[in-house]
Every structure is written in structure tokens, then in C-alpha cells.
């Protein structure tokens, strides 16, 4: 199994922006907040100190996580065939008479609330490699659903 983490170019840029913001902006502010809270006195009953320490811990943890992700990133290149679904594509689907648009992304970019599905999700893996006008059937918690690929767009 490869330990590479597949992302789109946009996904990589987003990860780099988040890392930069945490390191250059949020961490220094969290350290300053912790120092101010520490100066308030008794640390045992100082809720601001404990909250500031917790925030700084979360920031440090996320920075380490992003560093590991960025070490393992593999950018997924676009295919020459515009008619085949691949990671990074926005796909218009028809399901139960409705049209929806989803974007296929890497695991760390996925956000189903924003219609961004991982290529490793049941729907994503069913779509990758398929063409316009193909139907795919996906097992969902509500049962099997049939999707028709209507359109494939590259950004």
C-alpha cells in the first residue's frame, strides 16, 4: 500500500495556505494569549489559561498533521481524456430525476456538505474511470441508487 496522499493541485494549495496561516498567524496569537493568561495569576482556577493552552495544543497538533500530509502529497495529474471521470473533476449526475453536481477530490479535501466527495468514497470510486451517459449503481444507507453521468468538467 502506498503511503502517498493524493490531492489535486487546488487541494495542495489549500493545505499550504492552512499551514502558513497556522504557523504565521494563529500560533503566535495563541502563544501571546497563553502568556497573557499565565500572567493573570493562579493557574489552577484560571479558565482563560486552560482554554488558551487547549487552543495552542490543537494548533500544534494540526501543524504536525499538516507537515506529515505535505511530506506525503502526490498531485494527481489530469488525464488527456476529457470524457473519463477522474479526481479533480466536477461531475453532473442525474439521480431520481434530480440533477446534482459533485467534485471528486482526495480524502483530505472531502467535504460532502460542499458536494466534494473523496475518490475513495463509494460514490467516488464508482464514478472514477466512467464516461458521460454511463450509469453507476452505488450502495447507500438508503439502499441502492442509480446515477447517470451527464457532464464532466475540468477546472
Image (cartoon, helix red, strand yellow):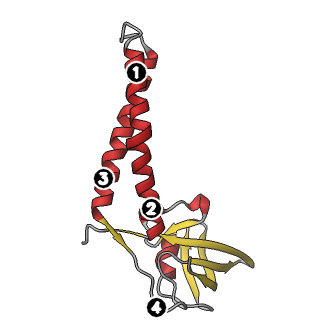
Give how far across and how far down residue 92 sits, in percent.
Answer: 65, 79
User: Can see residue 55?
Assistant: no
Tell me how far mark 4 sits from mark 2, CA to CA: 23 Å
Badge 2 element: helix
The residue pinned by badge 3 equals: 67
| Residue nearest the viewer, comparing 81 with 9 | 9
x 44%, y 50%: residue: 18
The first of marks 1 and 3 along the sequence is 1
The residue pinned by badge 4 equals: 80
x 39%, y 39%: residue: 59
Tell me how far mark 1 sits from mark 3, CA to CA: 26 Å
User: Can see residue 43?
Assistant: yes
Q: Up-down: is 68 above or below 90?
A: above
Dot 3 alpha-carbon crowd within 10 angstroms: few under 14, some 14 to 19, many 20 or more: some
Dot 2 alpha-carbon crowd within 10 angstroms: few under 14, some 14 to 19, many 20 or more: few
From the viewer's perspective, is the residue at label 4 or at label 2 nearer?
A: 2
| Residue nearest the viewer, comparing 144 with 83 | 83
| Residue nearest the viewer, comparing 40 with 152 | 40
Q: Up-down: is 114 above or below 22?
A: below
Tell me how far mark 2 sits from mark 1, CA to CA: 33 Å
Most extreme residue toward the front is 24
Check the picture and name the quadrant holding the C terminus.
Answer: bottom right
Q: Are marks 2 and 3 in contact (CB under 8 Å)?
A: no
Check the picture and name the quadrant holding the N terminus.
Answer: bottom left
The residue pinned by badge 2 equals: 13
In-image side of 3 versus 131 (left or right): left
The first of marks 2 and 3 along the sequence is 2
Amino acid at each position: 500500500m502506498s503511503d502517498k496522499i493524493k490531492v489535486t493541485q487546488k487541494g495542495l494549495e489549500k493545505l499550504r495556505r492552512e499551514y502558513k496561516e497556522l504557523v504565521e498567524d494563529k500560533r503566535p496569537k495563541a502563544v501571546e494569549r497563553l502568556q497573557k493568561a499565565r500572567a493573570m495569576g493562579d493557574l489552577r482556577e484560571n479558565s482563560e489559561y486552560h482554554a488558551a493552552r487547549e487552543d495552542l495544543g490543537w494548533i500544534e497538533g494540526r501543524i504536525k498533521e499538516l507537515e506529515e500530509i505535505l511530506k506525503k502529497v502526490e498531485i494527481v495529474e489530469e488525464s488527456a481524456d476529457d470524457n473519463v471521470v477522474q479526481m479533480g473533476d466536477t461531475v453532473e449526475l442525474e439521480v431520481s430525476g434530480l440533477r446534482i453536481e459533485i467534485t471528486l477530490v482526495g480524502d483530505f479535501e472531502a467535504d460532502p456538505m460542499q458536494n466534494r466527495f473523496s475518490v475513495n468514497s463509494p460514490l467516488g470510486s464508482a464514478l472514477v474511470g466512467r464516461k458521460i451517459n454511463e450509469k453507476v449503481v452505488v450502495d447507500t444507507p438508503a439502499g441502492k441508487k442509480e446515477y447517470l453521468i451527464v457532464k464532466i468538467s475540468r477546472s
